[in-house]
Amino acid sequence: MLSSNSNLAQLELDNGQVRTPVVWLARISRFLLKYGILLLFSLFFLLPWVWMLSTSLKNPQELVVYPPIWIPDPVRWDNYFLAFTEGSLGGFFINTILVTVPSVIGAVISNALAAYGFARIQWPGRDYLFAVVLATLILPDFVTFIPLYLVFRNLGWINTYLPLIIPTFLGSPFFIFLLRQFYMGLPEELSDAARVDGASEFRIFTQIVLPLAVPALAVVALFQFIGSWNDYFGPLIYLNDTAKYTISLGIANMQNSYGFMNFAWIMAATCLSILPIIVLFFFAQRTFIEGIALTGLKG
């Protein structure tokens, strides 16, 4: 009897951890249930992507088949080549890069400077002006399209990339708020020690604050890249020449030009258009997640 009780105790406890088969079975069941539910929900998000990729590899006859064909036969990889040649996708890519890269640079520089002024420098009316900046977040972009169009028309910037680039050098309320919250989480003692050593505010900003704010700046850069790369209404309003279209407007123009029978080309172009965003997020995801997690935390 004593031997039986000792064996049961050894089965249940080993270094403080429960080892009964029932408990292990319960843990495995919870694990499978949790990740099974997550996998099921992920399928709802992956299904449109799978359909888009499948459609990009179909021939025109398979586009109208019902029920839909998920695995093309044969696989038409030449749809991607035709999207570049017949659909002028290469030119749309170059135009989008010409808009996106300066926009990212402008967003990082302008918002980093403005947020530093709101977070680390004391001046009269700072908090009231910051409240006004935040209040502009409630204005929809569509409300400002007509006034901005009139301004840019008077400046002679219509049908150029300037209306898509220059505003990013003037700051964004959301990015200013994001970076301000991150700056406020940095220890004030670092800036105070630099001031005692005679460092100017600009030197403190460039040599102390900016290196520590790389995760938050990566978030701003990634958001701005995605916003500029996917922007449709901006190019639609300000660009008139087809040769200057960006990728979003170019794909819409392909749909109007080629119709449904060449829908595989459009899906191929769409797959290629999202590839840079996926690659960028893949390489920057750790910095991006760190910047989001640390924003607003006090040091």
Image (cartoon, rainbow, N blue to C red):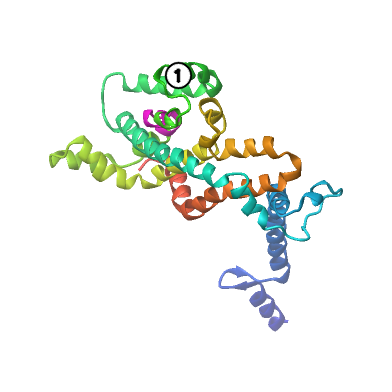
| Residue nearest the observer in this picture, 229 or 114 | 229
Q: Quadrant of the C terminus?
A: top left
Percent from the top left, x then y, of residue 297?
A: 41, 41
User: Based on the displayed image, in which of its 4 quarters is residue 102 positioned?
Assistant: top left
The residue at the point 69 percent across, 76 percent down is 8
- Secondary structure of the residue carrying tag 1 is helix
Percent from the top left, x then y, of residue 78?
A: 66, 56
The residue at the point 53 percent across, 28 percent down is 240
User: Based on the displayed image, in which of its 4 quarters is residue 183 positioned?
Assistant: top left
| Residue nearest the observer in this picture, 154 or 42 | 154
Our reading of the magenta stretch's main secondary structure is helix
Mark 1, residue position? 153
* Whether residue 296 can be seen here: no
Q: Within the magenta stretch, is there residue 169?
A: yes
Tell me if residue 201 comes above or below residue 63 in the rendering.
above
* Whether residue 283 can be seen here: yes
Q: Is residue 96 left or right of residue 209?
A: right
The residue at the point 48 percent across, 16 percent down is 147
Residue lying at the far right of the rendered structure: 66
